[in-house]
């Protein structure tokens, strides 16, 4: 290999493996086979497989990324350290830990020896460097194991050559190769000799795993809790000065002029005041000085695209756009329901931020990015620089939930740095992040289910949503895989394809249809955890409870009757048993239960709620069961499920955004009522079912929808009311910040 250096300055001579075996499409093939041969329904009206049963969004990601899935880089260094370059973003989901476990497992090395580092934007990866849709472990599971297995084979071959022994006679353990006569060689000693190409190996079978499948603490946990973990604004980029932006009073407003520009430039510590498309940027010696100067700016603003829009108008538009139901109730008993869900902020702990150093002939950007290839391309075009002159570094981020699919801060910082002709350290304030960040779209839902003699004959769901912005690389993935989609879906709109490959009903409810209409609003949106499923499946699980009541059935038993597979029933049975479903409870307290399946994984959730204080409904207990096929790190899965529960508690009970004339009223955590410690149950138990498959399913999106349904159903049983508008407690109980 050449003596080139990567972005961290290490020589590429240290890379032990770079290209691994060619990928396969076994996952997609198997998904279709499973869905088209579902288990037999017993005493129910069967439903045909949904498109998401045949091929889901994760399958499309894997299919689009297959041609470049082999381009992984792993290095074994002389001291025995194993470095793996991860072409995905770590945003707190525990991905680096799970990948480190896969590497350590295949190399028979201590987990402590593995370092997982986030890769810079690599355009040669094409569609294989986008983090989202619960896809990272699903798509990396095979390639990472193959890469590490190849490294192990080369190390064994190097030791065999050194000792003049047959490779088959050697074993590996604890970061070393061992001979039958007791001789050992540490991996670091063999690294140089093992760099010769041409060797390959087969990854271990699941039965041989000693680390994968064991609950394992995060490899970055100590750094995170001690403050040693370095996020974007912690990076030491020489000369980068603090920067904030004065933003318009409505979405997408434009700067017409600044009345006191000279006065602000003369304020203490102020270095630059420049206008960019998103507002007026202030660069100063400290963030405090920059924020003070920003507040002093007297800006005249032009209008934005949604200046006259408020909640009432948005709800009216969505209701008017909801497609009609097709099945008339006629003489058949039926359940009808309509639901409204508010806009929701992503609200990650780390606000939007980036560091940029733009020169006349080059640019370097640092930020938490889930679509770094598109970010690099967009920034290069915006700056007028050749692509090869722009370097984009991916930095571990403090939360995302879909927000960091977009690279607003990175592009904005690059523009400011170019205008100032100096490096800048851009921070969005919490108010900026809440009011001007992207958000989960508001939705309206119309559902009708017909039933007769205890059977469900039809289940229709019509969704109208504020348009979701997917201009972060996902559209290109869908386009690239369109020819492989089921007949008709390849020609669907991007939003329809996303909806149909993620949303499905797990029940045999006869004629089942789900449809989406999107409404342009001019409001900045982005995928939010679970994308369409959180609202869509949450609403459906509420109707399932109401169907159970209409047919005189227990909600748990009703679900169990109509679920399609034994695997689905297993997680539902687990929460019902462990949560003591049906136990007597005093007035004002109740249980709720719900189920969800997505991305080859399934989960059930049982909660208990206390509404005796009408001003503070609280979830007091939660039991969750999850089956992801092959769990890589059960402890990480527990964290994902608890995170999904917290998101559901927040958005079901109190957290939402009030849109008022083109801007949210909420501007901070004190106003956007995300669940705090006092709002979360002390009693939470997560049961990760043992491996039920040979491949891992998705987990990141999985935990929200069932929890939404369970919480809403518990609230309904405790109050005797039907929940229809979310969040349930949505008063403006604060004084909004000035615009």
Image (cartoon, rainbow, N blue to C red):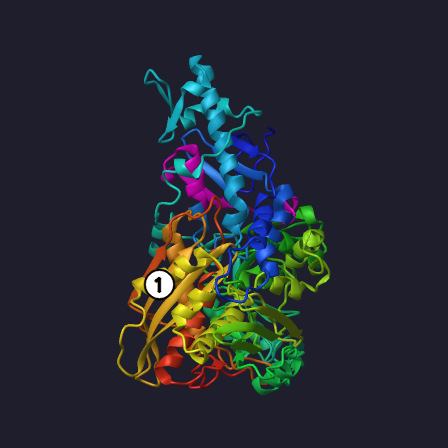
Q: Quadrant of the C terminus?
A: bottom right
According to the picture, the residue beneath numbered tag 1 turns out to be: 575
Q: Is residue 112 magenta?
A: yes
Q: Secondary structure at mark 1?
A: helix
Q: Quadrant of residue 2?
A: top right
Left or right? Give the position of 80 relative to 302.
Answer: left
Image coords of residue 327 (percent x, y): 63, 77
Residues drawn in magenta = 99-128
* Residue 576 visible in rendering: yes
Image coords of residue 689 (percent x, y): 38, 53
* Residue 674 visible in rendering: no
Left or right? Give the position of 321 relative to 645.
Answer: right
Q: Is residue 480 magenta?
A: no
Which residue extends farthest top?
Answer: 164
Left or right? Give the position of 321 relative to 132.
Answer: right
Label 1 CA crowd tier, 10 Å (few <14, some 14–19, many 20+): many
User: 144 or 337: which is nearer to us?
Assistant: 337
Image coords of residue 700 (percent x, y): 47, 58
Q: Quadrant of the N terminus?
A: top right
- Taking 591 as reference, is 494 above or below it? above
Q: How many marks?
A: 1
Image coords of residue 624 (percent x, y): 37, 62
- Taking 710 as reference, is 377 above or below it? above
User: 622 or 223: which is nearer to us?
Assistant: 622
Left or right? Give the position of 671 relative to 531.
Answer: left
The residue that appears at 48% across and 26% down in the rendered structure is: 153
- Taking 613 as reference, is 357 above or below it? above
């Amino acid at each position: 290999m050449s003596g080139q250096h990567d972005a961290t300055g290490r020589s590429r001579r240290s890379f032990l493996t770079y290209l691994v075996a060619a990928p396969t499409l076994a996952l997609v093939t198997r998904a279709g086979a499973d869905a088209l041969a579902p288990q037999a329904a017993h005493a129910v009206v069967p439903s045909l497989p949904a498109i998401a049963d045949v091929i889901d969004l994760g399958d499309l990601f894997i299919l689009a990324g297959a041609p470049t899935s082999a381009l992984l880089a792993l290095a074994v260094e002389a001291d025995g350290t194993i470095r793996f370059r991860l072409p995905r973003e770590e945003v707190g989901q525990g991905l680096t830990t799970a990948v480190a476990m896969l590497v350590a497992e295949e190399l028979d090395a201590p987990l402590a020896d593995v370092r997982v580092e986030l890769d810079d934007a690599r355009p040669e990866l094409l569609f294989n460097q986008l983090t989202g849709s619960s896809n990272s472990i699903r798509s990396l599971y095979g390639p990472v194991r193959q890469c590490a297995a190849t490294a192990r084979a080369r190390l064994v071959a190097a030791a065999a050559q050194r000792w003049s022994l047959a490779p088959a006679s050697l074993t590996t353990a604890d970061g070393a190769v061992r001979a039958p006569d007791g001789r050992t060689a540490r991996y670091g000693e063999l690294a140089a000799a093992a760099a010769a190409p041409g060797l390959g190996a087969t990854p271990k079978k699941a039965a041989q795993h000693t680390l994968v499948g064991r609950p394992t603490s995060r490899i970055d946990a100590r750094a995170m809790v001690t403050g040693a973990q370095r996020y974007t604004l912690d990076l030491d980029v020489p000369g980068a000065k603090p920067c904030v932006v004065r933003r318009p009073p409505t979405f997408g407003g434009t700067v017409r002029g600044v009345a006191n520009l000279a006065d602000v430039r003369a304020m203490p510590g102020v270095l630059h005041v420049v206008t960019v498309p998103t507002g007026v940027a202030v660069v100063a010696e400290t963030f405090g000085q920059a924020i003070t100067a920003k507040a002093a700016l007297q800006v005249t603003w032009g209008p934005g695209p949604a200046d006259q829009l408020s909640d009432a108008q948005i709800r009216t538009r969505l209701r008017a756009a909801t497609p009609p139901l097709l099945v008339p109730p006629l003489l058949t008993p039926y359940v009808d329901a309509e639901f409204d869900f508010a806009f929701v902020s992503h609200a990650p702990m780390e606000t939007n931020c980036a560091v940029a150093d733009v020169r006349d002939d080059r640019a370097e950007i640092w930020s938490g990015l889930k679509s770094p290839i598109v970010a690099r391309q967009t920034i290069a075009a915006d700056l007028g620089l050749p692509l090869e002159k722009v370097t984009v570094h991916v930095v571990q981020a403090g939360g995302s939930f879909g927000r960091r699919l977009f690279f607003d801060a990175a592009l904005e910082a690059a523009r400011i740095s170019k205008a100032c002709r100096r490096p800048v350290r851009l921070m969005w304030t919490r108010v900026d992040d809440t009011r001007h960040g992207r958000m989960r779209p508001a939705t309206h839902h119309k559902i009708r289910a017909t039933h007769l003699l205890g059977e469900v004959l039809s289940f229709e769901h019509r969704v109208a949503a504020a348009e979701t912005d997917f201009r972060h690389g996902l559209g290109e993935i869908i386009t690239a895989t369109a020819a492989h989609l089921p007949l008709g879906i390849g020609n669907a709109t991007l939003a329809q394809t996303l909806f149909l490959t993620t949303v499905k009903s797990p029940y045999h409810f006869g004629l089942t249809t789900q449809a989406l209409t999107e409404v342009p609003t001019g409001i900045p949106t982005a995928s939010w955890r679970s994308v369409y499923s959180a609202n869509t499946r949450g609403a459906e699980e509420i109707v399932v409870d109401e169907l159970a009541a209409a047919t005189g059935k227990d909600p748990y038993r009703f679900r169990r009757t109509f679920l399609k597979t034994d695997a689905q029933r297993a997680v539902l049975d687990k929460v019902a048993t462990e949560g003591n479903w049906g136990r007597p409870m005093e007035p004002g307290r109740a249980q709720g239960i719900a189920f969800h399946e997505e991305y080859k994984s399934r989960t059930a959730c049982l909660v208990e709620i206390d509404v005796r204080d009408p001003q503070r409904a609280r979830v007091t207990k939660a039991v969750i069961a999850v089956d992801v096929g092959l769990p890589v790190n059960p402890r990480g899965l527990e964290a994902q499920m608890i995170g999904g529960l917290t998101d559901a508690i927040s958005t079901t009970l109190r957290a939402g955004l009030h849109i008022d004339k083109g801007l949210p009223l909420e501007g901070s955590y004190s106003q956007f009522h995300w669940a705090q410690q006092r709002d979360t149950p002390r009693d939470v138990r997560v049961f990760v079912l043992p491996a039920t498959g040979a491949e891992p399913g998705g987990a990141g999106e999985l935990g929200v929808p069932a929890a939404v349904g369970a919480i809403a159903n518990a609230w309904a049983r405790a109050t005797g009311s039907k929940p229809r508008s979310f969040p349930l407690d949505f008063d403006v109980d604060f004084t909004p910040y000035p615009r």
